[in-house]
Image (cartoon, helix red, strand yellow):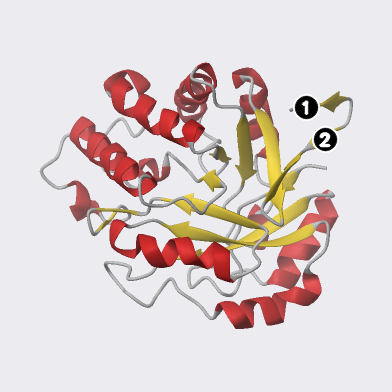
Amino acid sequence: MIFDTHMHCQYSIDSKMSAEEAKAAALQQNLGIIITEHWDEDYPTNPEAFVFDIEDYFKQFGPYRSKKLLLGIEVGMQEETAANDNLLGRKYPFDFILGSMHCVNRRDLYEEKTYAGKTKQEAVEEFLLATLANLKLHDNFDSFAHIDYMCRYMPYDDKELVYAEAPELFDEVFKMLITMDKAIEINTRRLDSSDAVNSLLVLYKRFRELGGRYVTLGSDAHYKEHVGRRLDIAREIAEAAGLVPVYFEQRKMQRMIFLNEMYTF
């Protein structure tokens, strides 16, 4: 079964989807899903916006939990919150923890002013350096989410991550993830663009060349209509890059098995 391992329901302030709606959408498509509510402690633009009552989350969503519906969290990494972030996975029984970068140096990547006065290359390099700094402090996650997150918002004519523009830094990030035995996510939000697909494929192939093996596939759905979106394209990227699609249950890696095809570890 294929799993959509990244989506947000009613415990994420920016979501318009309930757990019941996510479950129904997954059932309709014969998908497994992992709910990954936002956790960004002390968010620069609104410190309380992206945290939630985790005890209540498990209480309310526990009845939905099954082999096909798993409970996770997306932890937005910041250096200042690393100690608390690392405790989450030890304190609560998540199936899966995504580690992500939504901010650099206390600035929100969503906001255009974050890029003011910077060339695209300078902005990308700052993002990669901040990612490295956070990976050194964060160890309690399973997969690194949406490496192309900033591409959604950066105000440049060319909005793609180009490996050749910062090869040493991309390699450092990939090598660190590999050393930490982490997967990397193929996030499907931008895969309706051939430019995005082509530029990301270069990155995922490089991840594989350096020794990476595993990817998670995630729609990043905030609406019921987006559950499972473009997972077919993500699977094609994984296959082209030589990477194995996986998901996590009780923090243990599980392979995705497709009809007429089986990935092996």
| Label whose residue precedes the other's in the sequence (1 or 2) | 2
- Most distant residue in the right direction: 260
Residue 167 in view (yes/no): yes
Quadrant in the picture for residue 243: top right
Q: Residue at x 41, y 52 (%)?
A: 138
Point out residue 208 in the picture as x, y percentages from the top left corner: 54, 21
Rendered position, 19 above or below 102: below
Rendered position, 92 above or below 154: below
Q: How many marks?
A: 2
Q: What residue type is labelled 1?
A: Tyr
Mark 1 element type: loop
Q: Which amino acid does label 2 sit on?
A: Ile
Residue 156 in view (yes/no): no
Q: Which residue is drawn at 82% across and 35% down?
A: 257
Q: Whole-Å distance between the Cαs marked 1 and 2?
A: 7 Å
Residue, disc 1: 263
Question: What mark, if any, has residue 257 been given in the picture?
Answer: 2
Circles 1 and 2, Cβ within 8 Å, touching? The answer is yes
Point out residue 224 in the picture as x, y percentages from the top left corner: 67, 61
**Left or right side of 60 for 221:** left
Q: Please tell me which residue lies in front, 174 or 216.
A: 174
Question: What mark, if any, has residue 65 been given in the picture?
Answer: none
Rendered position, 196 above or below 135: above
Mark 2 surroundings: few (<14), some (14-19) or many (≥20) residues within 10 A: some
Mark 2 element type: strand
Point out residue 23 in the picture as x, y percentages from the top left corner: 77, 64
Q: Quadrant of the C terminus?
A: top right
Q: Which residue is drawn at 81% across and 56% down?
A: 68
